[in-house]
């Protein structure tokens, strides 16, 4: 968590619970959910920002079908992690405003790498 001009910026993933990661990992567990985002909104000051990077549901129907098929396995193997969530919709439903959002495929298997990267602001 970093403080900038009286506003809180969370420089980490949103998580409803934490778990340990291998030493080479630089980020804690990710479990973006409506509950976690509602808590982020609650603790952010008005105008505060949440920086997020999370994988989610791809716009390509073929990739999305594979993501939906893999999600139950992914959840069991990786602590509740979902491949098939629309992160932009979850953020908006929590009452946060997306100030910036980039979406892209990371290098590697497309079903595992569709990424939402952005900044969400708690309204003033």
Image: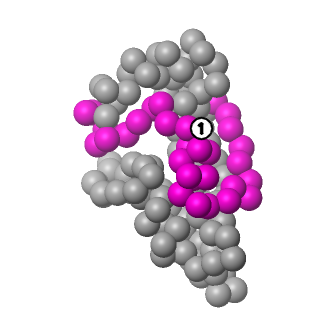
Residue furthest toward the bottom?
6
The reply to whether residue 26 is visible in this rendering is no
Region of the chain picked out in magenta, as a range: 76-105
Question: Residue sitting at 31 percent across and 34 percent down?
Answer: 75
Question: Residue sitting at 28 percent across and 42 percent down?
Answer: 79
Residue furthest toward the top?
62
Image coordinates of residue 3 in percent, x first then y, are 59, 81
**Residue 74's quadrant in the figure?**
top left
Q: Nearer the viewer, residue 27 or 40?
A: 40
* Up/down of 104 relative to 41, above or below: above
Asked whether 9 falls inside the magenta stretch, the response is no
Image coordinates of residue 35 in percent, x first then y, are 40, 56
The reply to whether residue 18 is visible in this rendering is yes
Q: Return the residue at label 1.
A: 115
Q: Is residue 37 left or right of residue 107?
A: left
Name the element at disc 1: strand
Question: Residue sitting at 43 percent across and 66 percent down?
Answer: 39
Asked whether 102 falls inside the magenta stretch, the response is yes
Image coordinates of residue 90 in percent, x first then y, are 54, 48
Q: Alpha-carbon neighbours of circle 1 within 10 Å: few (<14), some, or many (≥20)? A: many
Question: Residue sitting at 48 percent across and 72 percent down?
Answer: 42
* Up/down of 43 relative to 53, above or below: below
Q: Is residue 16 left or right of residue 10?
A: left
Image coordinates of residue 120 in percent, x first then y, are 64, 60
Q: Nearer the viewer, residue 63 or 11?
A: 63
Which quadrant of the rendered structure holds the C terminus? bottom right
């Amino acid at each position: 968590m970093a403080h900038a001009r009286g506003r809180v910026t969370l420089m980490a993933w949103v998580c409803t619970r934490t778990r340990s990661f291998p030493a080479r990992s630089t980020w804690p567990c990710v479990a973006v959910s409506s509950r976690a985002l509602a808590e982020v909104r609650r603790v952010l000051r008005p105008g505060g920002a949440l920086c997020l990077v999370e994988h989610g549901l791809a716009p390509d129907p073929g990739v999305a079908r594979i993501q939906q098929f893999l999600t139950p396995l992914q959840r069991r193997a990786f602590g509740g992690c979902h491949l098939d969530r629309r992160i932009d919709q979850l953020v908006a439903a929590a009452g946060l405003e997306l100030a910036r959002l980039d979406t892209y495929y990371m290098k590697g298997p497309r079903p595992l790498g569709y990424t939402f990267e952005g900044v969400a602001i708690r309204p003033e």
